[in-house]
Image: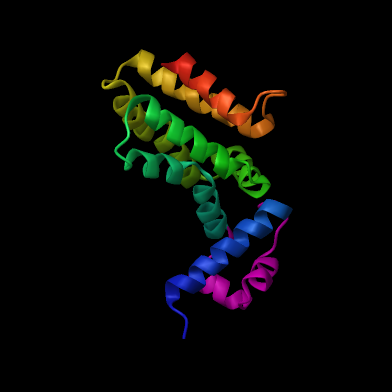
Amino acid sequence: MRRRGDVRERIVEAAMRVFAEKGFFNATIDQVARVAGVSKGLVFWYFRSKDELIKEVAKRSLPLDVISRCLCSGLKGRQLLRRMAEEYVRKYSCDANRSLLFQALSIKSMYPAIEKEISEVCSTLLDRVAEEVYGSLDLDKRVRVKVFFGALLCYALSGVEGVDTNTYISKVIEIVM
């Protein structure tokens, strides 16, 4: 017998694949169920509506996991920024993850829970990053951290022609330090 969490996780992973390919609104619960290998009713057992499933997938598409994991690493300063940049680029080098991120950002006004998560990333977590990188927090440091993540987002979107990832990350870190 499968554990409850395993089935839920399989549904979320299937939804991530289907939503990345079809989009949040064009994908159906039937498609998610088929990919997950479960019944449509079981999907609704774990998620009362498609909106709940969209919210879960959108939340996972944000860089919350990258930031949280890196903040727990004990790294500081440039080393912390480098680790975050490498993990961020790794996560969003995958077309599916990048697609889900941009979909999540585009629907935030429709879903207050997603908007709250994005706000959490853009305020509380980034403030923690600034404190760990610079040792204190003020407007200048907050802006530098936002510039850092903005640069990573732009890189995830289209890269920079003729510039390898390591060089790009080094240059961004140099700029924000």
Q: Position of residue 108 (x, y in %)?
A: 55, 40
Residue 13 lies in what quarter of the image?
A: bottom right
On the rendered structure, is 141 left or right of 147?
left
What residue is at 49 percent from the left and 69 percent from the top? 8
Relative vertical location of residue 13 with respect to residue 94 in this rendering, above or below = below
**Nearest to the observer: residue 122 or residue 147:** 147
Residue at screen point 58% across, 31% down:
153
Instruction: In the displayed orientation, state which residue is furthest to the bottom.
Output: 1
Q: How are the residues colored?
A: rainbow
Q: Quadrant of the C terminus?
A: top left
Residue 49 appears in the figure: no
Choose top left, top right, bottom left or bottom right for residue 30.
bottom right
**Numbered label tally:** 0
Position above or below: 158 against 63 = above
Seen in the picture, residue 54 relative to 101 is either above or below; the reply is: below
The image position of residue 104, as x and y in percent, is 58, 43
Q: Is residue 156 visible?
A: yes
Magenta residue check for 96:
no
In the image, what residue occupies the spot 34% across and 25% down? 77
Q: Residue at x 65, y 49 (%)?
A: 96
The percent coordinates of residue 81 (x first, y second) are 42, 29
Q: What segment is highlighted magenta in the picture? A: 23-50
- Depth check, front residue: 25 or 22: 22
